[in-house]
């Protein structure tokens, strides 16, 4: 039986009263992340040390509260949306850079550190941390770890998992484990690799050892405009066919280009059907060679406009256009629902056309900005929630987008995660046995199911018995009544 | 020794179902190249994956290839080379893809190509009790549920049998060149730090080897930078292997340890060794140890830095005195409930502290 008051007293003693929130306003603030789902919680704890995180977990164990780990709350899938009488453990106050060791190509940081703060800290030292999700100004390294975050530069450099050497994790029983190692290999199974992308369901990360890379000596950023989205997408394949894997290949359609241009004034071609932002890096000679190949690939596909950044100011401006996309769309409508599906690169155009058709059918405005290099689409539905019936249309359209991506051979999520929002789609891509194996993995970490319950796996996925209540419709027929509205259930 | 030699994943599932029922212990074998890695295990039968050698799908445009686990690395390299692509495992040609992944093998070009575990994006496997499980997706980015395949990578065939994988591949570099120079691990470390875009810097007991890969002008540019630091260098031809004499071609006898430490610890670790090859900037070193005494001496130095030094050829096991988390025990119990997959070969947690009883959350 959960005892919230006793847990609160214990937490106040361990963390100090100012670090434990239980007033209605605070609980309301922490009742959601950046997804469309609103839940509720009983307590919020803001620890500043690993020991305090352990105290939080132990209090939750003693007084039988579910735990919901939270970073900056920028997650888009509801993984940090609390449910029921839960204890939210937010690592937002743990923002330290513990040490940077260039000689070992690593840095130890605390989980609440914003991604961009790490990059800014490393830059003057001549080093960089490669993963750069668009949310990097606010999203935290700990959150990035839990969603295996990507970003534009993971085409050449790989996603977060390739840049995490070790993790200090407070396990669901309150014990502390170091998973992975500072060196290239560690003893034991790759538990580090399993925790990365586990959406706060296996433990609470309290320190992260990241791999840092020397800043490449040269970089070049180019913007190409095309008259058709087909030509734009074909250029991506042509670049790769020429043996070039650019550091980043971002594609934006006309709708998003126009929104961005009137917002950021980055000089994007507003008449183009689609634009391609390409960045190559390496040595001076390597960059020159790659630039030549990229331009040739664009030429061969009938490029209509070319801009090459001549200095770092212009480069920053071109990137500002891409990275402000989600701010710019506020001009279109007050609300948006951002998707994240990943498909084989060769299916990009087909899926994009399908997304346009879905939007048209449901009378919605859709814009597209995506990581074309790795087939990760981000269709954006813009809408006004106050218009009756709109939200329902958005959810129906979103449901169709997910199915479209799965039918094209894709996954449910490229970088945002499953959380609450997509858990009941899991049976579209995994068999009952696949899900049972995942449940076994989760139970090995958390036998009591205390850590972020009801997230990622659909209700009914169990380790040991292979009976999952899958209805095949993406809507579990089980006890969904107590889940927050907007969970698509 | 009895043999299981399956032709299909269904054969594998049936064989393991039976083995679990009857308590028959099984060693999964691919190309026999990584069998020495792991603690000694006594098994009843071997399961050979070598007939599971089909290409399932290959889309050069996607930079993804899907193959069965028993495919030989050499055959995969030939297939990919037709489209000027590669899976940078740098393993012996007769090693199998599954063996390389299950053993957690390291590429000699890890400085540039990263860890092989990050190239595995989807996997089909069979658990110890014969359940067929797929994890991941055939996309280069994916956060959809739990990455069971990451658990299998490097697990030495103790949790399941890998039957099929989707691998991220990369364009083959336009040109390659290996430079040989006089120098030690300290100089190798300097080169790796000052010329960061080289594909590999190997410090050996006989001198230095630096691997350059990229566009023609880029290689010239990198070669000048290396030569400025190393003094005279000799360039080997385009087709030379890197390293020139990989550890698996070292003379037989003795043990080869695969040391993994932070890069700055390499010179100190290798100070007493007379037969080694170290990947500067990465922190991997292959160290020849002629006696148990040498193994112990190397491991003592390695463990002082928080690293590991499993034997990958010859006797010596995994080493390591640090207990691994209790999660290991529960994972083994879930994925291989009858404990038939190479019992004792992988890491065993110390005796777990009793857990406080709790009610369900």
Image: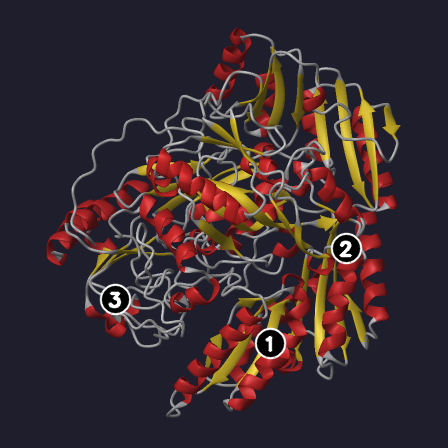
Q: Quadrant of residue A19?
A: bottom left
Judge by depth and name the residue closer to the eye, B192 or B241: B241
Q: Residue at x 59, y 58 (%)?
A: B138
Q: Quadrant location of the C terminus of chain A?
A: bottom left
Left or right of residue B317, residue A298 in this image: right
**1 or 2: tag closer to the N-terminus:** 2
Q: Position of residue A393 (x, y in %)?
A: 43, 87
Q: Secondary structure at mark 2?
A: loop
Left or right of residue B339, residue B220 in this image: right
Residue A26 got which mark? 3
Residue A368 got which mark? 1
Judge by depth and name the residue closer to the eye, B141 or A156: B141
Left or right of residue B187, residue A86 in this image: left
Q: Secondary structure at mark 1?
A: strand
**3 or 1: tag closer to the N-terminus:** 3
Q: CA distance from mark 3 to mark 1?
A: 35 Å
Left or right of residue B196, residue B261 in this image: left
Residue that badge 2 annotates = A244
Crowding at mark 2 (Cα within 10 Å: few <14, some 14-19, many 20+): many
Residue A209 got which mark? none
């Amino acid at each position: 039986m959960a005892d919230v008051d006793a847990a609160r007293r214990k937490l106040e003693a361990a963390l100090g009263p100012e670090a434990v929130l239980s007033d209605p306003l605070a609980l309301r603030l922490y009742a959601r992340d950046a997804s469309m789902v609103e839940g509720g919680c009983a307590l919020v704890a803001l620890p500043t040390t690993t020991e305090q995180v352990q105290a939080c977990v132990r209090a939750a164990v003693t007084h039988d509260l579910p735990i919901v780990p939270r970073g900056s709350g920028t997650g888009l899938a509801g993984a940090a949306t609390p449910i029921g009488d839960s204890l939210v453990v937010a690592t937002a106050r743990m923002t330290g850079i513990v040490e940077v060791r260039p000689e070992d190509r690593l840095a130890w940081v605390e989980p609440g550190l914003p991604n961009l703060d790490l990059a800014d800290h490393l830059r003057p030292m001549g080093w960089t941390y490669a993963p750069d999700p668009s949310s990097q100004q606010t999203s935290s390294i700990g959150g990035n770890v839990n969603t295996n975050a990507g970003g534009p530069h993971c085409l050449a450099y790989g996603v977060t998992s390739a840049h995490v050497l070790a993790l200090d994790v407070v396990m669901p029983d309150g014990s502390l484990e170091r998973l992975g190692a500072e060196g290239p290999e560690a003893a034991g199974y790759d538990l580090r690799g399993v925790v990365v992308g586990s959406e706060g369901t296996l433990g609470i990360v309290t320190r992260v050892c990241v791999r840092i890379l020397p800043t490449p000596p040269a970089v070049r950023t180019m913007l190409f405009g095309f008259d058709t989205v087909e030509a734009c997408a074909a250029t991506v394949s042509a670049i790769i066919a020429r043996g070039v894997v650019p550091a980043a290949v971002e594609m934006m359609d006309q709708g998003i280009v126009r929104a961005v241009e009137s917002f950021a004034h980055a000089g994007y071609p507003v008449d183009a059907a689609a634009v391609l932002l390409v960045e190559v890096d390496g040595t001076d000679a390597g960059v020159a060679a790659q630039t030549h190949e990229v331009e040739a690939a664009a030429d061969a596909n009938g490029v209509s406009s070319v801009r090459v950044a001549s200095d770092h100011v212009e480069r920053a401006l071109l990137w500002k256009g891409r990275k402000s996309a989600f701010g710019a769309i506020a001009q279109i409508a007050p609300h948006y629902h951002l998707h994240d599906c990943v498909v084989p690169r060769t299916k990009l155009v087909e899926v994009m056309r399908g997304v346009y058709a879905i939007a048209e059918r449901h009378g919605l405005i859709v814009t597209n900005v995506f990581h074309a290099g790795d087939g990760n689409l981000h269709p954006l539905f813009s809408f006004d929630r106050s218009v009756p019936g709109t939200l329902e249309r958005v959810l129906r359209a979103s449901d169709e987008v997910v199915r479209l991506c799965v039918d094209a051979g894709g996954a449910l999520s490229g970088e945002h995660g499953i959380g609450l929002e997509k858990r009941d789609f899991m049976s579209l891509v995994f068999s009952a046995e696949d899900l049972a194996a995942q449940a076994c993995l989760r139970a090995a970490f958390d036998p009591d199911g205390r850590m972020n319950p009801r997230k990622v796996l659909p209700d009914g996925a169990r380790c040991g018995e292979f009976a999952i209540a899958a209805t095949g419709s993406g809507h579990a027929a089980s006890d969904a009544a107590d889940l927050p509205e907007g969970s698509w259930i | 020794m009895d043999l299981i030699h399956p032709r299909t994943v269904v054969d594998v599932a049936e064989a393991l179902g039976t083995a679990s029922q009857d308590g028959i212990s099984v060693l999964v074998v691919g190309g026999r190249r990584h069998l020495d890695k792991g603690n000694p295990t006594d098994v009843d039968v071997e399961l050979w994956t070598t007939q599971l050698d089909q290409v399932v799908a290959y889309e050069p445009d996607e930079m993804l290839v899907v193959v069965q686990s028993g495919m030989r690395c050499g055959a995969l390299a030939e297939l990919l080379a037709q489209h000027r692509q590669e899976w940078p495992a740098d393993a012996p040609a007769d090693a199998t893809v599954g063996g390389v992944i299950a053993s957690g093998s390291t590429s000699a070009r890890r400085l540039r190509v990263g860890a092989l575990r990050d190239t595995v994006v989807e996997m089909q496997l069979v658990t110890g009790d014969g359940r067929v499980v797929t994890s991941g997706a055939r996309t280069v980015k994916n956060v959809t549920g739990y990455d069971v395949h990451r658990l299998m990578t490097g697990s030495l065939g103790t949790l399941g049998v890998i039957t099929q994988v989707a691998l991220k591949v990369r364009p083959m570099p336009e040109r390659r060149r290996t430079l040989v120079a006089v120098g030690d691990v300290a100089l190798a470390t300097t080169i790796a730090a000052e010329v960061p875009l080289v594909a590999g810097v190997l410090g050996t007991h006989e001198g230095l080897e630096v691997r350059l890969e990229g566009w023609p002008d880029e290689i010239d540019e990198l070669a000048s930078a290396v030569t400025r630091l190393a003094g005279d260098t000799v360039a080997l031809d385009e087709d030379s292997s890197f390293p020139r004499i990989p550890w698996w071609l070292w003379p037989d006898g003795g043990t080869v340890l695969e040391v993994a430490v932070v890069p700055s610890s390499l010179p100190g670790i290798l100070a007493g060794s007379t037969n080694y090859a170290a990947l500067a900037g990465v922190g991997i070193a292959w160290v020849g140890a002629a006696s148990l005494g040498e193994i112990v001496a190397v491991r003592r130095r390695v463990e002082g830095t928080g690293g590991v030094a499993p034997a990958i050829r010859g006797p010596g096991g995994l080493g390591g005195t640090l207990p691994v988390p209790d999660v290991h025990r529960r994972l083994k119990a879930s994925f291989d409930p009858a404990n038939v997959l190479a019992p004792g070969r992988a890491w065993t947690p110390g005796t777990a502290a009793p857990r406080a009883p709790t009610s369900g959350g």
